[in-house]
Image (cartoon, rainbow, N blue to C red):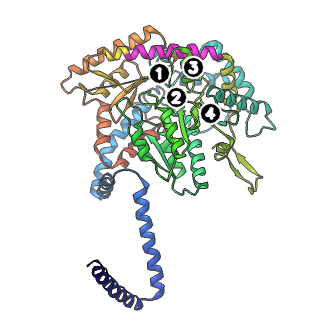
């Protein structure tokens, strides 16, 4: 029976084949070749479209349909008209603190006197109204700015302002400072003797460099389409790195504590996976991913693990000594191959420095770039930058040395204690629930009784700057040394409590607040390019001359 069936199929196949061949004989062979190439291109394009994003197909189809719909002239006009007002509002809100509404758009012909210029600089500095020193701002400025420390920064900056580590022959001192900062940070993370790293301009560049290195490593292993696998809570810098490096990124969900779902992480691994990511802690809820378990997966599948300690960089190494032990998060895990750590967050250095470090030189070399045949001479750089601000290395070096270990341990203890006090206070406010586990310095919360964004908007009116989160809707406070006093935490809890009461008593439960409306709108439209248009308007507004007063 079976052989009979096979025979029939074969006969049919022969007939079909012959008929196709006869058809083809009538076609010009040149057309045939072109047709084959075109067919291949269409096939590749389809594969590319399909593999370009890990979004479900129906979502992409919806977005595509919406995009086409938007291009219809009548719809386009209507949308443009609808966007006019919010765009103006964005422009106004960016410039709301600019009381002068004057804008210097060309270099003055004659020199401006230093006196005038310093006066103007002071005026600009006074535009900001947030009381950072009294804990009104989440994250952003991680240290108090004592006179003593600022004097030191001024002296160091003055000496190294024009230095450039790109030229170690001209600036041997600043080269040494950079190298010492890198080594000091590697030693905090128990890097083995072969480990090495680079100083970058910030956490984003550190992450981009690690992703770039693993992409290059993957290419060298014959993986042509490398994929980053990271939790949904990993920093947006990984998406940016994927975008810049032409890589794909696959996001893995988190459990109820906001730690990466390990089983899903393991299921997401395939032959294209070039790196696994864990955060210590993550930005949204300040929860530390299970790094030892991610490390084991990395070893099992021979995939390098990157730990993003950008935020926690100068807290987690001191947690044990401060009385808050954490599972091992550093090179003590044999699968952890690289770590990003920001000096310019809890390291308390002025903005513009971060460290990316690797377990060995071989991995570090994948991030190096060199062009031996450049007409300007043999050219090589370790990071994205060509010229680098030597002053950034110098002020980082001076901050680490002038603080010393014990200062960091003390700050860590006080910040983490304050975070626990805040979490405790928030958990007692009716209608609020903590989100994730506040393992270190971030406390995130949401509400099942009212709109949490309305709480954020009202806190803004009270002079606070907190962070809005989404998926799910929540807000967080990232505590800095400026929050590390009991009365500041208690004041924050009291303000939150009264604001929550207000929102709870609103008939709409805060659903009409401006941030709620913005996020609601963004979530409701399948076509994310519309949201892109608004974020572009926001960035354009930052560069724009101030609109006139009215
Ligand atoms: C801040 C942060 C980054 C990015 O650092 P930047 O210095 O802002 O570029 C990366 N990861 C985490 C967890 C962060 O909190």
Q: State the CA–CA distance, disc 2 to disc 4.
A: 12 Å
* Residue numbers of the magenta segment: 403-423
Q: Which residue is mark 4?
A: 355
**Dominant secondary-structure state across the stretch colored magenta:** helix
Q: State the CA–CA distance, disc 2 to disc 3.
A: 14 Å
Q: Position of residue 367 (x, y in %)?
A: 64, 45
Which mark's residue is nearer the viewer, 3 or 1? 3
> Which one is earlier in the sequence, the residue at label 3 or at label 1?
3
Q: State the CA–CA distance, disc 3 to disc 1.
A: 13 Å
Viewer-side residue, 15 vs 52? 15
Q: Secondary structure at mark 3?
A: helix
Q: Which residue is mark 3?
A: 318
Q: Which residue is mark 2?
A: 311
Q: Is residue 96 magenta?
A: no
At x 72%, y 25%, the residue is 158
Which mark's residue is nearer the viewer, 3 or 4? 3
Q: Is residue 336 visible?
A: yes
């Amino acid at each position: 029976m079976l052989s009979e069936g096979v025979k029939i199929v074969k006969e049919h196949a022969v007939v079909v084949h012959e008929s196709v061949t006869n058809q083809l004989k009538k076609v010009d062979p040149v057309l045939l070749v072109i047709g084959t190439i075109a067919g291949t291109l269409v096939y590749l394009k389809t594969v590319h479209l399909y593999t370009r994003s890990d979004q479900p197909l129906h979502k992409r189809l919806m977005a595509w349909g919406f995009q086409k719909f938007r291009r219809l002239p009548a719809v386009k006009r209507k949308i443009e008209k609808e966007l006019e007002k919010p765009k103006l509002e964005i422009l106004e809100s960016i410039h709301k603190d600019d009381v002068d509404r004057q804008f210097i758009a060309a270099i003055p012909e004659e020199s401006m006197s230093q006196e005038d210029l310093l006066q103007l600089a002071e005026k600009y500095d006074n535009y900001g109204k947030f009381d950072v020193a009294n804990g009104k701002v989440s994250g952003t400025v991680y240290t108090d700015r004592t006179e003593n420390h600022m004097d030191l920064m001024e002296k160091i900056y003055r000496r190294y302002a024009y230095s450039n580590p790109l030229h170690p022959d001209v600036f041997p001192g600043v080269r040494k400072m950079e190298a010492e900062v890198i080594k000091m940070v590697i030693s905090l993370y128990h890097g083995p003797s072969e480990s090495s790293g680079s100083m970058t301009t910030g956490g984003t560049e550190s992450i981009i460099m690690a992703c770039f290195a693993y992409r290059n490593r993957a290419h060298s292993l014959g993986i042509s389409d490398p994929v980053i696998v990271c939790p949904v809570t990993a920093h947006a810098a990984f998406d940016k790195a994927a975008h810049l490096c032409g890589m794909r990124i696959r996001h893995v969900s988190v459990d109820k504590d906001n730690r990466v779902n390990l089983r899903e992480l393991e299921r997401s691994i395939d032959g294209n996976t070039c790196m696994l990511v864990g955060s210590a802690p993550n930005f949204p809820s300040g929860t530390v991913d299970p790094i030892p378990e991610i490390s084991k997966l990395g070893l099992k599948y021979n995939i390098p693990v990157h730990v993003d300690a950008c935020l926690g960089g100068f807290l987690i190494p001191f947690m044990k000594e401060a009385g808050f032990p954490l599972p091992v998060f550093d090179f003590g895990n044999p699968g952890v191959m690289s770590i990003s750590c920001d000096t310019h967050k809890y390291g308390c250095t002025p903005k513009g420095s971060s460290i990316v470090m690797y377990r060995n030189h071989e991995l570090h070399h994948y991030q190096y770039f060199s062009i031996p045949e450049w007409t300007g001479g043999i050219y090589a750089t370790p990071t994205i930058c060509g010229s680098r601000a030597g002053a950034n290395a110098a002020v980082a070096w001076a901050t680490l040395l002038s603080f010393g270990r014990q200062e960091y341990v003390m700050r860590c203890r006080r910040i983490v204690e304050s975070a626990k006090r805040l979490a405790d206070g928030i958990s007692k406010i009716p209608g609020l629930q903590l989100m994730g586990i506040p393992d270190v310095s971030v406390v995130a919360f949401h509400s099942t009784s009212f709109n949490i964004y309305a709480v954020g908007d009202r806190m803004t009116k009270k002079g606070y700057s907190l962070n809005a989160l989404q998926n799910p809707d929540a807000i967080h406070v990232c505590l800095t040394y400026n929050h590390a006093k009991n009365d500041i935490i208690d004041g924050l809890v009291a303000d939150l409590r009264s604001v929550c009461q207000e929102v709870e008593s609103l008939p709409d439960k805060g659903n009409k607040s401006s941030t709620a409306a913005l996020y609601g709108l963004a979530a409701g439209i399948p076509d994310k390019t519309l949201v892109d248009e608004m974020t572009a308007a926001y960035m354009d507004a930052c560069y724009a001359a101030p609109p006139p007063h009215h």
